[in-house]
Structures are given as C-alpha cells and as structure tokens.
Image (tube, helix red, strand yellow):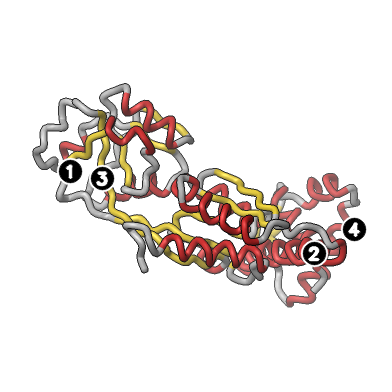
C-alpha cells in the first residue's frame, strides 16, 4: 500500500469532496479520482459513497480512515527518528499533557530525564483531552498524559495505562450558603448554579452523573475552556463546580469547601496514552518509566 494514496484518501475525507481536495492539493479532479480508484481496487472495496454534493465514508472507509491516521502518524514519527539518527541531532520528545500532570509529577519526571540525558529536548503541549488525543492520532505528539477514558473509534487506535485514580466531589467557595455540613441529595445538587470547564473528563463525568439519576445535566451558568479560570470564578461567586482530588487547586485549596453527597459516585483515572500501533521513541519511553516511578509514591497511585 502506498502511503501517498492513504494521505490523498484522508484529504478527500477531510474536505468531504474530491473536487475540493483536488483544488487544495493542486491536482485535477480526474487525477485524484484515479488515485482513489487504485486504493479501492487494491483493498477490493468501496471506500467512499458519492453524493450529489461531495462524498461520505462507506462502512469500510470509516475503518480505513481511522487506521490511516494512525499509520500516517507512525510513518512520520519514524521519519523524525531516522532524521535524528542520520544528522546526529538532539533526541526530541513531543508530548501532550492535561492539567493534573503539569502540576508536580510531569515537571519532576522531565527534570530527572534531562538531568540524566543532557542532550534530550522535551516539547510539552497543553490542552483539553479531546484536542490532545486528536494530535496524538495525527502524529503531532508521541504520547499524551491525561485521562485514560477512551470511547468510540479511539478504542481501536489508542491504548492507555492508568497510573492515578481519584474520586469526585463538588467544590464551592468557603462560606457558601450550602456548605453546612449536611448531606446533599441529587436534587439539591441539581438546583445549584454551576461553573464548568469544557472539553474535560470532569465535564463528561458531570453530565453522566445527573443522567444516571434520571435528571438532565444542569446547564452551567459559566463555561470556560480553562480549569484554572473556572476555579477562580468559583472562589468569587456562589457557583459550584465538579472536581476530583486530582484537580489542581494549588495554594488556593483553603478557599474551597467540598459538599457532602453520598450519592456522588464515580472516579477518574489518568495516566499515559499512546497510539496502539505506533512505536514510542526510546527517550519518550524513558520519560514514561520515570513518571511511573514517581506516580507510585502518589497518594492516589493505582500501583
């Protein structure tokens, strides 16, 4: 299979149109269609269904598209490593990290790694889990450190290793009227006004928690795609937020109170995510091992 044909196929899918993809690639529509036909003939199946306007993936095409992203990502990762060897350049690690790992554990692991291997170069990208997973699948990242919950097609493409587990809780500011020490029912929590971070595992847990009790998830009064901003808002208002004991409260923990709610269940696991069919660069694997060793000493270590 020609990697170029896979990339052309991916480009068509991303544009939803052979014509638009051809324009973007500087090719003619017939030439691009010919490459697609070669790929379909090689696999013995139709990958795209032609529509009056554009195309859509066939069932076989959906399978190939997911794996094509992983194949292309591994191919580009291999080229980077080969280039490092051929040019004697510094070994580079490119990882993504959620907020929890940035506050203590990952910085310690990186510091230990660069101390032991002075020529290594580490690039860390931060963001919400969904964005980091997409970058991992595209090959922009070698690894991701974050929530290990994987769903849908990603289960076939990403493998995870849990290192830390923790329970959930509701946070409000110190002195909040509902922070009276009494156990709160699901209905009590449903009546609160909320501030929630978007695109995070905690937000997904928030929605699932209420739905599992037959209630629609409350519409947050404030939504921010940054957990630190969300927490700051909570300390200056009567809004509540869902958090875990992994939520990075830092030096501001004294500004919060945790509400008692025996019905609130659910835990979060966080750790290492990698492409299932990819090869982790040696230095990235050394970083993982360092992080595993540090995590074993954590209060919520799964080990």
Q: Which residue is mark 2?
A: 79
- Between marks 2 and 4, how big is the CA–CA gap? 27 Å
Q: Tell me: residue 80, above or below residue 20.
A: below
177 on left or right of 30: left
- Residue 284 image-quadrant placement: bottom right
88 on left or right of 110: right
Q: Residue at x 39, y 42 (%)?
A: 248
Are circles 3 and 4 on residues that touch, CB within 8 Å? no
Q: Residue at x 66, y 70 (%)?
A: 279
Q: Which residue is mark 1?
A: 186
> Across the whole image, how many numbered discs are drawn on residues?
4
Residue 268 in the image: state x and y as whole percent. 35, 55
Q: Quadrant of the C terminus?
A: bottom left
- Residue 82 image-quadrant placement: bottom right
Q: Which residue is mark 3?
A: 169
Residue 64 in the image: state x and y as whole percent. 66, 67
Mark 1: give few (<14), some (14-19) or many (20+) Cα within 10 Å: some
Q: Tell me: residue 146, above or below residue 162.
A: above
Q: Which residue is mark 4?
A: 31
Secondary structure beneath dot 3 equals strand
Residue 7 in the image: state x and y as whole percent. 77, 60
């Amino acid at each position: 299979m020609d990697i170029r044909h896979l990339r052309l196929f991916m480009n068509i899918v991303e544009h939803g149109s052979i014509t638009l993809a051809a324009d973007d690639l500087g090719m003619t529509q017939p030439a691009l269609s010919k490459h697609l036909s070669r790929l379909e003939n090689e696999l013995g199946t139709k990958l795209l269904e032609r529509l009056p306007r554009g195309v859509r993936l066939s069932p076989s095409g959906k399978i190939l598209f997911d794996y094509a992203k992983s194949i292309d990502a591994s191919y580009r990762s291999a080229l980077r490593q080969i280039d490092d060897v051929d040019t004697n350049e510094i070994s580079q690690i490119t990882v993504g990290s959620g907020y929890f790992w940035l506050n203590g554990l990952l910085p310690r692991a990186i510091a230990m790694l660069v101390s032991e291997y002075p020529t290594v170069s580490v690039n860390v990208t931060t963001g919400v889990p969904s964005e980091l997973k997409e970058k991992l699948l595209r090959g922009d990242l070698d690894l991701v450190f974050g929530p290990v919950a994987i769903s849908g097609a990603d289960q076939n493409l990403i493998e995870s290793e849990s290192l830390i587990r923790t329970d959930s809780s509701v946070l409000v500011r110190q002195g909040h009227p509902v922070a009276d020490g009494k156990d709160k029912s699901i209905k009590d929590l449903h009546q609160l006004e909320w501030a929630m971070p978007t695109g995070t595992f905690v937000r997904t847990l928030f929605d699932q928690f209420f739905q599992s009790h037959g209630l629609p998830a409350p519409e947050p009064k404030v939504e921010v795609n940054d957990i630190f901003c969300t927490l700051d808002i909570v300390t200056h208002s009567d809004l509540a937020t869902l958090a875990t004991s992994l939520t990075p409260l830092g030096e501001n923990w004294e500004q919060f109170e945790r509400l008692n709610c025996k019905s609130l269940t659910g835990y979060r696991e966080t750790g290492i995510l990698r492409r299932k069919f990819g090869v982790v660069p040696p230095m990235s694997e050394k970083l993982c091992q360092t992080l595993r060793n540090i995590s074993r000493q954590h209060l919520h270590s799964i080990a």
